[in-house]
Amino acid sequence: MNTVSYPHPVLPVANQHSNLPELEPLTRTQILVAMGSTAVILLVIAKLWLQLGRVDLLTVTWEGIAIAKGLGLGLGVTLASSLVYQVWGAYRQSADYYLALVLKPLTLTDLVWLGLLPGLSEELLFRGVMLSALGLTPIAVVISSLCFGVLHLSGRQQWPYAIWATVIGLLFGLSAIVTGNLLIPVIAHVSTNWLSGYMWKRHQLLEEGR
């Protein structure tokens, strides 16, 4: 299982009847190291692609309106993910399994890295470099989103999670092309990770306190 991927926006509750196989619990250190290592690998790939492929990185423009759009997109994706979680049983089971594996050992302060490490490295590679290299076209958005979804496929049973990651990748990719600003999907990505991670951890702590 790819333990270094991270939760995209959902508001899950604990799943008591999962048919997915049990995995060996991971420690907090293992998860943090895995997240950090994956972020470094993705950043290295992006850097090499930029240099060897002579690709121009998608522009990052720091503007108040861009930050607002990124936060708005992140909130919208979070709400959409919450709805999908409620109505699609296969996704709910897949998300519970995945989030429990990744988030359960982490502390609330660890969520800072949960947002920043994947949000920065994955957006740089998939939206910043790959989209530009493929021509900033709708086809480029589809290809980069499929690659993004595959990154989150940690096993055969996790296909609903990978499908939803692909859909989110499409939204992030379109936002990058329409605005021409990589900052928007970066902020959306980071904010959705923070929000989904906080909601899951909050639910976990409430359950443990009962």
Image (cartoon, helix red, strand yellow):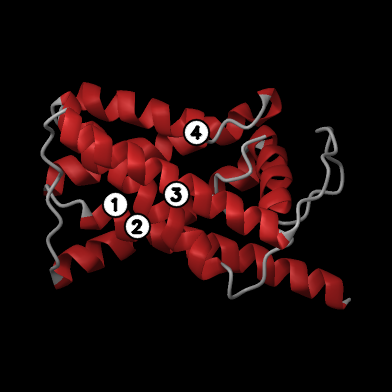
* Mark sitting earlier along the chain (4/2): 4
* Mark sitting earlier along the chain (3/1): 3
Callout 2 amino acid? Ala
Q: Which residue is mark 3?
A: 39
Q: Which residue is mark 1?
A: 185
* Mark sitting earlier along the chain (3/4): 3
Callout 1 amino acid? Pro
Callout 3–callout 1 Cβ contact below 8 Å? no
For discs 4 and 2, the disc positioned in front in the rendered view: 4
Callout 2–callout 1 Cβ contact below 8 Å? yes
For discs 3 and 1, the disc positioned in front in the rendered view: 3
> Looking at the rendered structure, which numbered label has been put on residue 151?
4
Q: Which residue is mark 2?
A: 188
- 38 or 109: nearer the eye? 38
Marks 4 and 2 sit apart, C-alpha to C-alpha, by 18 Å
- 126 or 91: nearer the eye? 126
Q: Locate residue 70, reporting x and y percent.
A: 28, 60
> Looking at the rendered structure, which numbered label has been put on residue 67?
none
Name the residue located 63 percent from the left edge and 32 percent from the top edge: 154
- Secondary structure found at label 3: helix
Marks 3 and 2 sit apart, C-alpha to C-alpha, by 17 Å
* Mark sitting earlier along the chain (3/2): 3
**Crowd tier of the residue under label 1, counting other residues whose Cα lies within 10 Å: few below 14, some 14–19, many 20 or above:** many
